[in-house]
Image: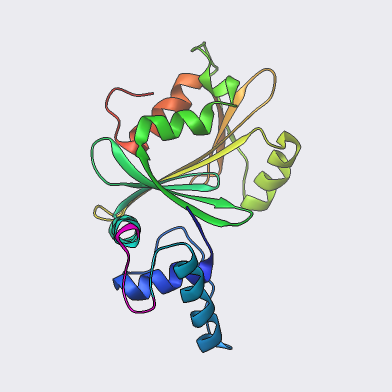
């Protein structure tokens, strides 16, 4: 189900949730009362709330939203933020033109959906050179990656319990898959299994993908 920023802010108030990770909730400052009324009415139209209660469907939605907001481990994959809930299960927030699509899913199935149109990343392993190239600052990297267009996969794995953060940006052309490490400003050539391994590790999928 797709929710606007104001609707998610209202759900945070209803469920007393912390600020959600990876979702840009717009601050309700000017005309706050009117925006809150509109958000509540919209949630009522979706069957989440009644005038003075939470519906059965709304209880399930709010429980899902609580799980997302209270999670401590996340994987960001382009416009998707995946909250790790259990060994296989996750809650996914996907940024769309209409808002944020919030849904529960299986980790492996979610990643398959993300990669189904990225044939290069689903490819076999191959020998790659061990060379590492220094790209420098982020502006230099941005200029480097612009020509790759949609052939870019930005991935970040976050574990707030351990204070761990790993980020890679993968991009590819007809010859190679490149990996950029923002923390070091370095680029290297990798193969498809290594990309999938990075994603699997971020999702804590022992058997890989």
Give the quarter of the image for residue 133.
Answer: top right
**Quarter of the rendering containing residue 153:** top right
Scheme of colours in the image: rainbow
Q: Position of residue 17 (x, y in %)?
A: 31, 69
What residue is rendered at 46% in x and 28% in y? 112
For the point 33% across and 79% down, which residue is it? 52
Vertical side of 89 occupied by 7: above or below: below
Q: Position of residue 179 (x, y in %)?
A: 55, 32
Q: Is there any visible trace of residue 108 in the rendered image? A: yes
Q: Which of the pair 157/141 is nearer the observer?
A: 157
Asked if residue 191 can be seen in this view, the reply is no
Residue 12: within the magenta?
A: no
Q: Nearer the viewer, residue 182 or 4?
A: 4
What segment is highlighted magenta in the picture? 51-57
Vertical position of residue 206 compared to residue 85: above or below: above
As rendered, which of 45 and 128 lies closer to the eye? 45
At 46% from the left edge and 57% from the top edge, which residue is drawn? 22
Q: Residue at x 32, y 55 (%)?
A: 64
The question of residue 52 being in magenta is answered with yes
Drawn side of residue 28 relative to residue 138, left or right: left
To which quarter of the image does residue 202 belong?
Answer: top left
Note whether 178 is above or below 186 in the view shown.
above
């Amino acid at each position: 189900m797709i929710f606007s920023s104001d609707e998610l802010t209202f759900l945070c108030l209803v469920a007393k949730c912390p600020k959600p990770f990876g979702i840009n909730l717009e601050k309700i400052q000017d005309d706050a009362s009117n925006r809150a009324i509109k958000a509540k009415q919209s949630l009522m139209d979706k069957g989440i709330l009644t005038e003075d209660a939470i519906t059965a469907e709304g209880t399930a939605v709010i429980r899902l939203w609580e799980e997302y907001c209270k999670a401590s481990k996340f994987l960001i994959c382009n416009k998707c933020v995946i909250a790790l809930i259990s060994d296989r299960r996750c809650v996914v927030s996907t940024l769309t033109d209409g808002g944020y699509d919030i849904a529960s899913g299986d980790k492996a199935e979610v990643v398959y959906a993300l990669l189904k149109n990225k044939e290069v990343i689903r490819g076999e392993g191959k020998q790659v050179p061990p060379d590492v190239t220094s790209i420098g600052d982020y502006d230099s990297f941005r200029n480097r990656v612009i020509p790759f267009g949609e052939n870019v996969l930005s991935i970040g794995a976050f574990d707030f319990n351990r204070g761990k953060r790993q980020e890679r940006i993968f991009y590819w052309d007809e010859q190679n898959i490149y990996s950029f490490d923002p923390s070091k400003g370095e680029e290297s050539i990798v193969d498809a299994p290594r990309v999938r391994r990075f994603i699997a590790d971020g999702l804590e999928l022992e058997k890989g993908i």
